[in-house]
Image (cartoon, rainbow, N blue to C red):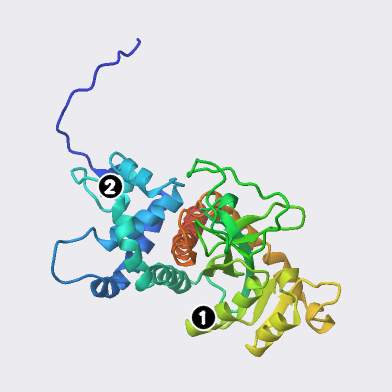
Amino acid sequence: MRGRHEEQEVMLAHVDIEGRVPKDHPLRTIKAVTDEALKRLSPEFDRMYSRVGRASVPPERLLKASLLISLYSVRSERAFCEELEYNLLFRWFLDMNLMERSFDPTVFTKNRKRLLEHRVGQGLFDEVVWEADRRGLLSDEHFSVDGTLIEAVASIKSFRRRDDGEPPSDDDSGNPWVDFRGERLKNETHESRTDPEARLMRKSKGREAKLSFMGHALMENGNGLLMDFVVSRATGTAEREAVPVMLDDARQRGYRPRTLGADKGYDTRECVRAMRNRGVTPHVARRTHSAIDGRTTRHAGYRASQKVRKRVEEVFGWMKTVGGLRRTRYRGVERTGLAGYFVATAYNLVRMANMASCERARAVQAV
C-alpha cells in the first residue's frame, strides 16, 4: 500500500541527540580526543578573556567549530553558522542543545586576533599530538619533511609594481582590465595590493605562477601523523630554511629525531649540514651532485625513509581537498598559519579515529 505524504505540523518533541549519533561514528573518537585537549588548554583560555563584561561564545566551541569546517569541507564560516541551525551532528559535537541559536559568523573574525596572540591554534595541535604520543601512535625518531604551495586569496591582477601609483586601466574598480604585456613580473619589484605577504611562485617548470604561501609539514614515519605544520612566505629556499626550525621545535617538545626523509629539493650542503649539526641523519633523495654519499644511502633505513616519505603527499592531498587548504580564505602568513594548524589538527584526528576503528575491528575478529 502506498504511503501518503502528510504536511508537517508544529509539534513539541523530545529528541535525544546522543542517541542519534551511531556508536561507531568516527566523530565520537574525534570528540573525545578534542575535549581532552581543550580541557588542558582551559587555563590558557582563562588568560585570554577578561573577568568582567558580557560572556563570550566559549572558545572551546569556536575551536571545535573550526575543526568541523575542515572535517566536513564547509566552504566558509558563514556557511557553517547557517548549517549549524539544523545539523544535529554539528550541535552534538559542539555540546549545543536544540534550543540554542547558532552564533554569528563575525564571532570567528572578532576572536581571530585573540587566538593568534595566544598561539591557540598551535596549542591545540600540540595537545592532539601529545595525546597520540600517549596512545603509542608516534615514532619519535624517524621523520619526513616536505613543502607545498598554498594559493593566496589574491588575483594576479593585484600583483603590480611597488612604485606604480596609476589607477586601474578602466572604470571597473572590482575587476579591472590589466595589461601585463611586455612586463616582467618579479617578487623583487612587484607585490600584491590585496595581500602584500603573498609571493609569486610556480610549482614546477612549465606551470603557471600564482600568488602563494608555503606550507611545511613534518611527519612521523610510524603512522603518518603530522608532528608540525608551519606556513611561511613562498621563496625558493623556504623549504630548506624550515627544516632546522621544525627539528628544534620537535626537540623542545621532547622528541628525538634521528633520521629525516626528504626529496631532492633538500639535497643541498647547507640543509644537510643543518641536519647533521642536530644529530639527524639526512635521508634525502640524491641529486646528480649530491651532498650525501654511499655511507648514508647503503643502509636499509635510507631506503625505508625514501619509501615512507612519499606519504607526505597524501597528507597534503587530504589537507587541500577535504580540509580546504588548497587556497587560503585569509590574508597574511599569520592567519593562513592559524587555519593551517586547524586543518593539520583535523587530519591527525581523522587518522587517530581510523586507527581506533581498525583496532576495534581486530578485537572483534579475535573474539
Front-most of residues 162 and 323: 162
Please state the horizontal and vertical placement of residue 188, each as a whole percent of the image.
64, 68
Please state the horizontal and vertical placement of residue 235, each as a whole percent of the image.
64, 68
Secondary structure type for disc 1: helix
Give the vertical position of 182 relative to 217 (above or below).
Answer: above
Picture disc at residue 18: 2
| Residue at screen point 29% across, 62% down | 60
Q: From the image, which quarter does the N terminus lie in?
A: top left
Q: Residue 150: in sight, yes or no?
A: no
In the picture as drawn, the residue positioned furthest to the front comes out as 166
On the image, which quarter does residue 117 sit in?
bottom left
- Kindly identify which residue carries mark 1: 249
Front-most of residues 364 and 345: 345
Q: From the viewer's perspective, is 13 left or right of 118?
A: left
Secondary structure type for disc 2: helix
| Residue at screen point 43% across, 72% down | 126
On the image, which quarter does residue 162 sit in?
bottom right
Front-most of residues 81 and 27: 81
In the picture as drawn, the residue positioned furthest to the top comes out as 1
Q: From the viewer's perspective, is 112 left or right of 298?
A: left
Are discs 1 and 2 less than 8 Å apart at CB? no
Q: From the viewer's perspective, is 294 left or right of 40?
A: right
Front-most of residues 358 and 166: 166
Please state the horizontal and vertical placement of residue 3, each as a whole percent of the image.
32, 14
Please state the horizontal and vertical placement of residue 337, each as a whole percent of the image.
48, 65
Q: Nearer the viewer, mark 1 or mark 2?
A: 1
Q: CA distance from mark 1 to mark 2?
A: 39 Å
Which of the two discs, 1 and 2, labels the residue nearer the N terminus? 2
Total numbered circles: 2
Amino acid type indicated by mark 1: Asp
